[in-house]
Amino acid sequence: MNSALRREYLAALGIQAWVARGATALNVAIPAAASAVVARAAAAPAQPSDAPVPREGGADWPELRARVASCTRCTLCNTRTQTVFGVGSQSAEWLIVGEAPGADEDRQGEPFVGKAGQLLNSMLYAIGLKREQVYIANVLKCRPPGNRDPTASEAAECLPYLEQQIALLRPKLMLAVGRIAAQNLLRTNVTLGGLRQKVHRFGLMQVPLVATYHPAYLLRTPSEKGKAWEDLKFARQVCAGV
Ligand code: URA
């Protein structure tokens, strides 16, 4: 991406220049730091032998999509307009995981299509990724009424679908956006502040997972955008295997 275009995106984020201190341009050199900060989910050890066996094992993409579309495992099926399966490239290296569909997503059947989604797109673009290049999904496939937080049992019922998406996708990196997504994926109550800037591992495949702020939170709290930018650069280092 050329730097003028990237600056335009950063401006859209309300950030004048997302530049690492000491760097000269937006094409920031990636320091060899990520390997030093691999902290295997200190508060929430990566799923060891007690990891649940995915109940959706064996399904291919169309079969899995069909199972999700007809799911009645929890009461959210009574209030949803439709399920929100996920979107993006099935050969994506990055899997972005949010919390649950909101009103816009419930209506359109696609994750992150509202204002938060626009900011997510800009955040991705700022690190050189187009929305179509990544895969985007949520912990929950159905909208909780009134956008309330997912319950523990809703998350437990729905996670096998995400686990099977991960098995099919085999991403190089998972980016959990927001506290709810990160805590549910890592099975911890540690705050987002305590989870970010570390490499966690998810599931049987031990996929590297990085946590950052939810774009909806960043829209409400723009002063935190700088930290989100640090997290994105960190995630990019992790994905590059630095
Ligand atoms: N927030 C989320 O966490 N996911 C969406 O799909 C939309 C908003």
Image (spheres, grey):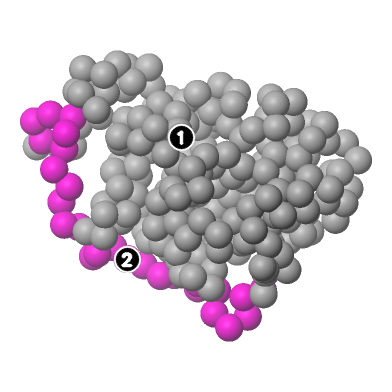
Residue shown at 45%/64% (left/top)?
A: 207
Dot 2 surroundings within 10 Å: few (below 14), some, or many (20 or more)?
some
Q: Position of residue 45 (x, y in %)?
A: 50, 73
What secondary structure is the stretch in magenta mostly built from?
Answer: loop
Mark 1 vs mark 2, CA separation in Å:
28 Å
Please determine whether, in this image, residue 75 is positioned above or below residue 127.
Answer: below
Q: Residue furthest bottom?
A: 49
Asked whether, in this view, residue 148 is left or right of residue 1, the answer is right
Q: Earlier in the sequence, mark 1 or mark 2?
A: 2
Please determine whether, in this image, residue 48 is positioned above or below residue 190.
Answer: below
Q: Position of residue 211 (x, y in %)?
A: 45, 50
Please determine whether, in this image, residue 186 is positioned above or below residue 86.
Answer: below
> As shown in the figure, which amino acid type bears the numbered disc 2?
Val
Q: Position of residue 178 (x, y in %)?
A: 53, 43
Q: Which residue is mark 2?
A: 38
Q: Which residue is mark 1?
A: 132
Q: Nearer the viewer, residue 79 or 186?
A: 79
Start and end of the magenta stretch? Answer: 23-52
Q: Nearer the viewer, residue 62 or 183?
A: 62
Is the C terminus in the top left, top right, bottom left or bottom right quadrant?
bottom left
Q: Can see residue 183? A: no
Residue shown at 71%/64% (left/top)?
A: 56
Q: Is residue 7 magenta?
A: no
